[in-house]
Image (cartoon, coloured by chain):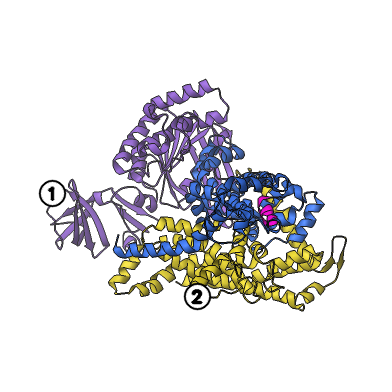
Chain colours: A purple, B blue, C yellow
Amino acid sequence: MSRVELKQLRKSYGAVEVMKGIDLVVEPGEFCVFVGPSGCGKSTLLRMIAGLEEQTSGQIEIAGRDVSFDEPSKRGIAMVFQSYALYPHLSVRDNIGFGLSLARRPKAEIRQKVDAVGEILQLGPFMDRKPKALSGGQRQRVAIGRAIVRDPQVFLFDEPLSNLDAALRSQMRLELTELHARLGATMIYVTHDQVEAMTMADKIVVMNAGRIEQVGTPMELYQRPATPFVAGFIGSPRMNLFDGDVARRMGCDVYGIRPEHLLISESDGRWTGQVRHVERLGADTILHLDVPELGALVARTDGNCSFHPGQVVQASPQPDMEFFYAAPG
Amino acid sequence: MKRRQYVIGAVSFAVAFVIFVIPFIFVVINAMKSAAESARLDFRLPQKWQFWQNLTDVVQARDYMLLLAYFNSTVITVGAVTLLVIFGALVGYVLQRRPSRFSSFVYAFVLTGLMIPPAVVPTIWVLQEINLFKTLHGMILIQVAYGLGFTVLLYRAFIASIPRDLDEAAIVDGARPLQVFFRVILPLLEPVTVTVIVVQSIAIFNDFTHPLYYLPGRENVTVQLTLYNFQSQFVSQMNLLFMNILLVTIPPLIVFIFFNRQIVAGMTSGAVKG
Amino acid sequence: MKRKSHYPYWFMLPAISVFFVLFIVPTLASLYFSLTIWDPFEARFSGFENYVQFFSEPFLVRGVVNTVGFAIVTCVLKTILGLLLAVLLTSGVWGQGLLRSIVFFPVLVSTIGVGLLFQEMMHPTQGAINVALSWIGINGPGWLTNPSLALFSVALVDVWRGVGLATLIYIAGLATISPDYYEAARIDGATRLQQFWRVTVPLVWPATTTVVMLSLISGLRLFDLVWAMTRGGPGFSSDVLASVIYKQYQSGFWGLSTAGNVILFIMIAVIIAPLTYWFNKREVES
């Protein structure tokens, strides 16, 4: 259990700055998720913490120690890669024990530690197989096992679930959360999937273009997104965002309202519009409206509502659920 | 399969047989004849089969020179191929993993060896200066230098297919650069290494030109050199010349039968999209 | 403070030092030595004398001309035959696996062995080729004894030996062409011949590039086959640059021999560089 602190971390390739001064504290035992669109720098940031990429300037502290220029293996971290990066020529047992064997630990000790990890992850029957003979979920577990056996102060996960199918992914989400509860270790987790971020994180770090947009708990980000970018990124369907003249009429630079915070009725409301398209999801219905005053507007209503394309309806924002931003993000 | 394909196949076989197979049959038949019979250079079957006698005659000729030649050729081939595998894999690894100006420069440099013929006389001068002229280890290093381009080409292309994540996982696990290479990368290079070994062994074993220049002298004779020298010696003993040709043809034939796939892979992967 | 790379350049040190000392140094040195009168005892600077000699002595000029001719003839034959054989051997004919092996095997056989074998088979009176020709009433030529035919005969043997490699490369190239193209062409009503010219030839272009380059370079550099079959004879009629280089070296004219080497580099560069450019351009366009 250790604290991770980043101070004014920057990275540039030639004249292009891809990491623009990151300051962040991850508290001991916290499950912290970096989330953002692809290319926002979240993986680069994780790899800088791991020591696989070198920062141009700034400082990284793990457990109070400046590790900015330490080798990855000396930082007290373990990493689970997106591709799992299992050594194809080694058995599951040797994959998990590889780091210990490099460190020339006694054979008996390696065996005992590896077996213990196999136990935790229920890999017992597969210990002598090669990675090729395992399913995606089993490979994932081996990759996690290789991290656990190092007994790290911080676990780093780089989009570890993106190669799994949807069903397995939600199962692994649960397992990872349980693992975190059991080990109590600090974990930093990178994903582009806001569902993973919302369901697993103690703390979410939303990144965009090499900068941190906002840091907070999942509900904080949902309820009080600090910027239009965060507002648009967290929540599904996406928040309706308007800039330009529409926003100016509302007295701000960007105006936002979530689809689930719109009340739709046939009789009265703030805006009048026409239903263009109806998406029925069962529990909910998503309405796509053309509102002359605003433009396109998306709203969420009950599953069994009776709206149909072409119908003229009224839409109103719920009180206190509107967002007014100065200066567009 | 259609009837047409049988017919075309059969015709092709007939043509291929005449053009490509008969010359080898010619070698086999004449390698078993007596000296007088083989002098006629024809396709008649031997009246007297004397395989063993011709074989022992060839082997014993010039004081067992052929055995010495096989020994020398084997030493050169094994030595050079061993070095090529390790050196070539290391170069291909760094060049692929560390893209930089310097790497591109080195790569272009190494590939010139595929195109430019070696400057032979100045090479002899260099070999003399460093006391490697007329030595087997000098010849081994020459073959390493000449085979490096193709070997690096093969390794670099293959290493590109090994995910970098593997190196990084090993680095996080605490592996030093040499450990990453020898414990993670090298074991994964097995398929391309087999190809390199087979293709380079055949090339080096069959090389005539470079031993001719850099390994003059009786004690350093190689298989191809003896074959060439026997020609003038066996003017009246064609049977022995053909036996000798047969003996140099058999090793590649055996290699070809066992490693057909790897040879094809090597020849084409180096070639298509070079 | 910069951390060390995990891919240190010193990994390349052993290979590069061997390559540098035994390949690059001699190549650079050859530029100087080609300008000297050099023999086993001394090297005396003589300017361009060796080059002048190379382009004025008829037998040396012959070597240069022969080299180019040999490379072009073998390259054209290997390319055309290689493509045709590859098309045949991917069309699903009976026994195509074995046929591929038969065509390819000579590539692996010792060049000296092949040279000596054909030297015997091309014997003007007793040789197997002329004996076979006499059965059908043809009076075979003196393949290697006729000065105007000798180099061509060597070229034929080089094609015999090397066409398997060209075929193999073309087979690999053909394998990358999706059958969809042929089906689309058939639906458009293309005949077999049209399919060959309009689909196969353009789509197999990268393989053509490789085959042409490889066979040109190996044709320009060829030494062992000529040496085993004719030693450049009769007279100097089948001499190529590589055999001239060897002969001049043997006779102690090291400077002249080295000048031959430099001419060979330049020739390869002059022929290959524009070809590479042209091939790449066509590849991008198509």
Quadrant that contains the C terminus of chain C: bottom left
Q: CA distance from mark 2 to mark 1?
A: 97 Å
- Residue interval drawn in magenta: B222-230
Nearer to us in this view, B60 or A288: B60
Instruction: Point out residue A305 in the picture as x, y percentages from the top left corner.
Output: 13, 51
Rendered image quadrant of residue C130: bottom right
Q: Which of pointers 2 and 1 indicates the residue nearer the eye?
A: 2
Instruction: Point out residue A239 in the picture as x, y percentages from the top left corner.
Output: 30, 52
Task: Identify the secondary structure beneath mark 1.
Answer: loop
Task: Identify the secondary structure beneath mark 2.
Answer: loop
Residue C273 circle label = none
Instruction: Point out residue C266 in the picture as x, y percentages from the top left corner.
Output: 69, 70
Q: Examine the rendered structure and indicate whether residue A281 appears above or below residue C269.
A: above
Q: Examine the rendered structure and indicate whether residue C226 appears above or below residue C58.
A: above
Q: Badge 1 is on which residue?
A: A304
Q: Badge 2 is on which residue?
A: C137
- Secondary structure mostly seen in the magenta stretch: helix
Instruction: Point out residue A285 in the picture as x, y percentages from the top left corner.
Output: 19, 51
Quadrant that contains the N terminus of chain C: top right
Residue A40 in sight: yes
Q: How many marks?
A: 2
